[in-house]
Amino acid sequence: MGCSQSSDAQWASPTLKENMQNAPVDAQTIEDYLELEKEIAEAETSSPGLVLQQIKDQRAHLKMRTEQQKIIYQTLQQQTKKEKQDVDTLDIPETKRLFMEQGEDVDKRRTKEMKEYLDAKNREEIALQELESLKDQNDNLDRELEVAEKQAQSLQELYQRQDALISRIFGGAYGSENENELEHQLDQHEEMRNRIVEANFKWKQAQLMIDYAYKQLKEAVKQWMLLPAINSQNLEEKYGVACIARNNLVAASQNIQGAQGYLNTVQFPYCSPPEVATLNKATAYIFTDMQTPDRHEHALECYTITSKRCGALLQWINQVVHNTIAADLEDINKKVKDTSMALRQERVRLLQVKAKEITGEELDIKVQDINTDVKVELNLNALALTEGIDPSLLATLTAKDLERLKIISDDDLAPPPSQEDIFGKVDALKNQYAEDNEKLMHQLQENQARVKDSLEEKLRNRRQRRARKHLEEKERDALIAN
């Protein structure tokens, strides 16, 4: 909520600097400043810089996955074509006669070839479903990227307006040492919050995707259990139900892998990559498994176990989100809010003093409370969707929901991840901030007796806002990459 002060280069003209410094500071000036603070707080609530970077990262990842999936799909298309040719070959009279002369049962050979063809066709359809889902997600992200870029640019413009206003009022210097100290504290809190908000977004996005995958797996199990009761002569209904089960299994697998992508530094205690690979392998043979009771039962066991373990994974993620991240986010939001309020109050006090110096008028300006909490919307477009499961129903889980969703007891649940797994190397960051803060306080004490201009020069070097600097660096990196 602070601002970066203008460099000396901006004041190359002494006349311009003098005019700006002597510009009147009145009640309207203070109101303009407070209104800008409010607009910035509202814009920062959605954390556009974080969202923009997340969309860019996800977009790059999805484009790579889409290209890989295209190759997989094309390969499976060729395999299906070959298997179909093998089936069609058995209808050629000369081929039939050749097999009969060799003593081979043509009907058994046809059954075998048809099974291999159906399995290949199923794998091709699964690959196509995954490819179409990835394409949809890419299209959605392209639209989201355009919106996020506009929001980030709007916030940058607000920062620039704030910089210009503060620079005009204070002539590029700090109004007081207290203002400098408060802004430094706010920088620390906001940087720490950026880390926590990013972790919160990733874990809640993974929570959303695992919640959806869990519902899809339960739907797949439900549909799969209906198959034995369907008359074997009613092939259309039988295959229709199997397709619903298959589509939910495929989408659930994608969502689990998508959640792992958001938490790529965390090892899932349930539904690990080998488990998902086993599920994918079982799904590839779903139309063969539906043919006999033994294979149907074996597949049901695989789907049921995966469903339960996905529920346990959801429970594990829920604990991290609600028991760890939520408390840390609430704490850091309060620190940002309190420090931001104190900084605004100090600046208004300074503005009132300056106004009195210029006009002799006592200004009574009330500094109102501003909601500075950051809340990032989750990305529903990242989900691999299936019919019948509404993603909008996947709302924030309450304590009662968590209790109801328990698959296993808390005592038997896998231990939670470490703080470093959740937030990254936050402890190192905290130590760095503590050391930095101690150095700042020591420097302030030493400089109190020194020349004021020297102190202001050192303070100006620290004036650059961390949040803005982070976004600008990302944009520079993007320009360099392009």
Image (spheres, rainbow, N blue to C red):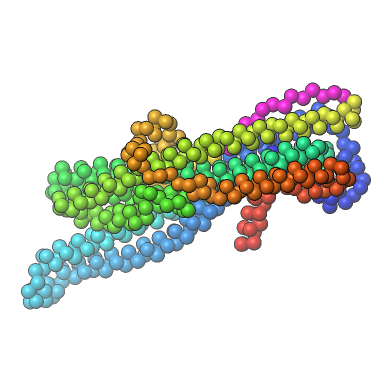
Magenta-drawn stretch contains 362: yes
Rendering coords of residue 45 (x, y %): 60, 37
Q: Quadrant of the N terminus?
A: top right
Rendering coords of residue 168 (x, y %): 83, 40
**Quarter location, residue 359:** top right
Which residue is at 29% across, 57% downward? 281
SS assignment for the magenta stretch, majority = loop
Of all residues, the one furthest to the right in this rendering is 15
Which residue is at 20% across, 56% downward? 288
**Quarter location, residue 354:** top right
**Quarter location, residue 27:** top right
Query: For the magenta stretch, what is the residue range?
Result: 361-374
- Residue 40 can be seen, yes or no: yes
Q: Is residue 334 left or right of residue 209?
A: right
Task: Name the residue nearer the viewer: 370 or 232.
Answer: 370
Which residue is at 61% across, 33% downward? 334
- Residue 160 can be seen, yes or no: no
* 10 up-or-down from 76: above or below: above
* 114 up-or-down from 422: above or below: below
Q: Give the total of numbered labels.
A: 0
Rendering coords of residue 100 (x, y %): 8, 73
Which residue is at 76% across, 40% downward? 180
Task: Name the residue nearer the viewer: 28 or 296.
Answer: 296
Magenta-drawn stretch contains 319: no
Q: Quadrant of the C terminus?
A: bottom right
Rendering coords of residue 206 (x, y %): 44, 45
* 65 up-or-down from 390: above or below: below
